[in-house]
Image: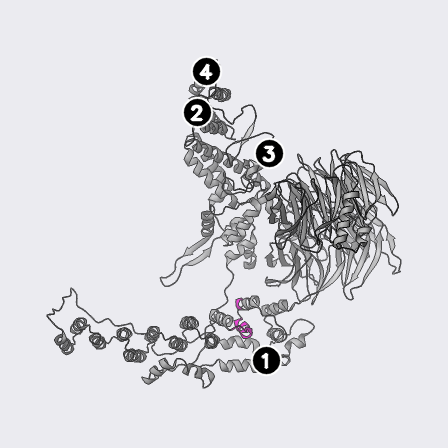
Amino acid sequence: MPITLETETAKVKGLSFHPTRSWILASLESGIIQLWDYRTGILLEEYMDFYDESVLPVRCVDFHSLQPLFVAGGDNYLIKVFNYKLRRCLFTLKGHIDYVRSVEFHKEQPWIVSASDDHTVRIWNWQSRQCISVLAGHNHYVMCATFHPTENLVASCSIDQNIRVWDISGIKSQKNTGEDFINITQLNQDLFGQDDVMVRFILEGHLSGVNWVAFHPTQNMIVSASDDHMIKLWKFTNDRAWEIETLSGHSYNVSCAKFDEKQEMVVSNSEDGSIKFWDYIKGNVLETYTIENTKFWILATHPKQKLLAAGHDKGFLIFKLHRERPASEMCENSLIYVKDKFIKKYSIKDGSEITIAQLGRSGSKQQPYAISYDKFSKHILITDRPRTLKKNGGRRLQNKDTWELYRLPQSKGRTVETIKKVHAGDGSAAVFISARMYAVLNKGKLTLRTVNKSGKRTIEMPSEIGNVENIFSATVGTILLKTSSHIHLFDFEQMQVMESRKLKDVRFVSWSENKETLALMTKHYIAITDAKLNVKCSTHEMIRIKSGAFDNHGIFMYSTLNHLKYMLPNGDSGTIRTLDQPIYIVKVINKQIHYVNRDGIARMLHIDNTECLFKLALCNGQTSKINKIIGSSKILGKSMISYLQKKGYPSIALRFVEDIETKFKLAIECGKINIAKKCAHQLDQPEIWKQLAAEATKHGDFETVEKCYQNVRNYDQLSFHYLINGSMQNVQNMTNLAVKKDNMQSAYQNSMYLGDVEKRVRLLRKMGKLKLAFVMANVHGLTSLAEEIKNSIEGEFEMPTFSHTPSLFQPPTPVNPNQGNWPLLRTDDDDEELLTQQDDDAAVGDDDAAWENMEGIPGLEDEFSKEATQETVGEDGEEEEQWETLGDDIVGDIDAIDLDQSDSNEVTAFSEPTEGRDMADLWVDNSRFPLDAIASGEFVIAMDLLNKALGIRNFETLKSHFMAIYSTARLMMPLSNQLPSLMLPLQRNDFDASIELEERKHQSLPAYSSTYLLETIETAAKEGSKLVTSGKNDEALDLFTDLLNRLPFVIISSKKENLRYQDVLTKISEYKLACTLKKEMNDADDKRRCELSAYYTRCNLSSTNIKMGLNTAMVTNFKAENIKFAATFAKRLVKLSPPASIAKTARFILAKAEQAEAANKHELNYDDRNPFIVCGYSHSPIYIGSESITCSFCAAKCLPKFQGKTCKVCNLGTLGTKTGSIYQYLRKN
């Protein structure tokens, strides 16, 4: 029985599951109500209303079954109703005059029932916000009150040792809700204590106070829990009630008890720290779960799912009560599965279901773990793995795993025959491997058997395989063997391993119908292989994978906790839809998914697989299928557009994008200049034209660039464009245009482009720059023009002298001037061929003819040919006319000076090749360690993992390590001056030349610095210890800080390494704390310095460092005149045999302490006779027996008041959050 969530909070007094969402409410003794998502383990919300008012315990909480409400009651005598959508308290119900012990919503009526220490039970109308009845009769604290699930009854229990069952039919039948009725009701309550309510039964039998009472969900039974250490079960009818069973086994007060309607079971918890699961028919304990040194207070069961929550002193746990995965197996077009001891058969064709037989099994109703069916002999194998509570420190039942063989009846009569087992034995797995032969795995040993018991053979497994943990069916004559790290294909006829694949913790396998493809599923990973275990593709999921099956197109459909997804043969994956509850897929046919739900009921789900088929057609190059889907479906959203672009078919996406701005951006990104040009006309924005001009320049489409600059009136860019294109006549015309518009600066710039000195001189003269014009004319030999200008200069002017000979600077000449647009390797029309060509290969499927029929898409060819015509530039038509109408003032001026338009042969834009996937991107898929995710560039995934596994939340400290790991995994190779450096991923694992490239991709892991090796850190830790010994405290502190920052990135691959990791982490954190104490002593006053020196001696250091610490504490306290304290350290020091000089000083101090006047000047927070550990946050003692919390990363101990703060020892982890190592987290998840 696995634990799905374990939290650490204050004492939990109340719990309640949400009926539909994965939420649970926890009310705490600290006065806080917490809302958790138990699937993700995330704290969603905290409600502080009780905390803000009185900081008193909140003892009870309950979700409404339909409305977004929950109710809570506490020690402030109040009942509060909250709306979790609004995240606030709506109103408060007042009336109780003592602690409120329990609250509960009625499932149908707008009522709340509450129990209180004021000896009463009250029923409230939460709509009118009035108390409608007070049930008085108990003469002590009322601990619990609850509504019957269907009848008009309320049960309550009290410390007076009684259980009362109340009939509230009178309240329900009362229709008068006016003011008079409320007044009369209040009067009755004041005088008699109740109204329209009568006591039907008083149940007596407990010897002490009763803490809990609960109705059975479907039967007329009541369970009660008491301080007499007993659980009692009661039966009742309309006129009487009686005790039917007493369950004893707890050693202290029983806090709570609940029925489990799925099985004949009662669950109870107690202040003895245990949870017990009882078979109330037999009256014995099935299982026991124990946490030492804590008390359990409350239980809550999920109204729809098989979940149980238990609250205790330090938080709460959530268990799965039963195995959720139904035992089932496909046999051709039928599903064979077991439900409630019945073997059922579900037809895939018509959805009918029949019961084949009833299992003649005794015992509980626990569902089988797995089944295997042989259609030839009509035998079925059933494997049972008894539930166990997996918790260190808790008790675990040592029940054996067993298997049973049954023969199904041949008759098809209406009566259901009870069948008995043919054979049985011990074993954790049993599967049929061929007709009438099956294999059994028991404690790592494999045995082959026949259904008629005529043969039995034990297989000697090769030693290199290791311990076999599970077996799966495979092709005829073979079987799949699963070990902790590999999956092996074993041929039991040749007695040898045929193939092996390294894959940890394979949980399920799924074969395609033709047995050519296999899906291997772990908790978070799927690998698709061929029959020889060669990996074709794989995918990684962050959410747990539940099941999967291949459809008739070769697409693998799989389910996670909350999604239905698919994976194509090329590794592309996507989401089909979300799921309210997990499903277990057994068969996929076209658009139908057949599955079994958690209740063991076979169902069929209709899906839209158009997106899958479209991507599959793209993958296989089946163009006619693509045309068919595009013509009949609307699948092109943003994600599909991105997918088409990635796969090299951007033109398909562009034709179906309706938003003009999106289409423009996509066309720019894909280099589709003609389409972008049309979009730019419709948008007509300066920024759009600039983007188009920049992209057209990259593709050598000079005509488009020219038109863009005309539209934005950018003369300078247009002139430069003509210059680089070699259109010098156009540059001359732009110069004339600038002169005409009196833009002398632009005209001068253009004359420089032309190398026309005379033009520049005349422009300078026209601008009044006579001296500059004269110098330029004189330097370049324009003598006559220079004389004219000189005569115009007023006053004396001397020609400046130059240290060099001036020369005319000419702009570079284009290699191929006036050659028009660049020729392209591929045009837009090349992509259009994808939609117009016919596929020679026949499409796979039953509707081949429909896929190949292009005529079935009305108007498709006409639409394509029309758009192709519109995109042609240079022909007479709309496109040319649009260019002629741009900017009348600008274009008119250009036309007036006869701007030369160079002819060019029209070509379209270059389409870049599809970018492949970088090897570094695969690292995060191949490994789940944070270091590998960082090297892959997935910082967010790494931070999320470090937070969940180690509780780290201060990532600013680790920033330098993130960058170092990322850069270490890459090599920058410089190329020529004109090209950027080439980045190459560095790998830490070598590959044999025989390993294929695709397989290497799925095994590649990044290289990293040796500073993150565990051996390196262990060596550095020893050096740090030497630094402490040599008195270099600051250097040691810096080193230990750096080591703590490196430890989260260490890769741990075995339990032995994990133990070494934990040891070095503990050692480094202890030394870091000691060094911090030593440093703090420098700035502390005498008293604090004495305390810190005393705390230093309690750190877990080497013997040499402890001696030095004791000497420091001894001397520090002696100098501060704390003689007696100094003597305690001297006494400890002498026992450790220090150097002679130190021993002499210690004996001197001991002698001083024996004198009568010896005393302590300062009272220290230090007790040498009471062992303690040092709080890593406040640097104060935590004595043995006191409560403490630990850091989620370095495990430093701190006082509970620092819950939730960042640890000061490592400056990384969160105080009070329970985690382990990365190794433990990855194994668990």
Mark 2 is on which residue type?
Answer: Thr
Quarter that holds the N terminus: top right
- 10 Å neighbourhood of mark 4: few (<14), some, or many (≥20)? some
Image mark for residue 1187: 3
From the viewer's perspective, is 963 left or right of 81? left
Q: Which residue is mark 2?
A: 1116
Disc with the residue nearer the chain's start (1 vs 2):
1
Which quadrant of the structure image shows residue 842?
A: bottom right
| Closer to the camera in the image, 99 or 371 | 99
What secondary structure prevails in the magenta region?
A: helix
- SS label for mark 1: helix
Image mark for residue 860: 1
- 10 Å neighbourhood of mark 1: few (<14), some, or many (≥20)? some
Q: CA distance from mark 3 to mark 4?
A: 38 Å
- Residue under the point 51% across and 54% down: 938
Give residue 462's position: percent from left, percent from top.
67, 46
Q: CA distance from mark 1 to mark 3?
A: 76 Å
- SS label for mark 3: loop
Give residue 814's position: percent from left, percent from top.
32, 74
Q: CA distance from mark 4 to mark 2?
A: 15 Å
Image mark for residue 599: none
| 985 part of magenta stretch | no
Q: Is residue 1042 visible?
A: yes
Disc with the residue nearer the chain's start (2 vs 3):
2
Image mark for residue 1152: 4
- 10 Å neighbourhood of mark 3: few (<14), some, or many (≥20)? few
From the viewer's perspective, is 165 left or right of 748? right
Q: CA distance from mark 1 to mark 2?
A: 93 Å
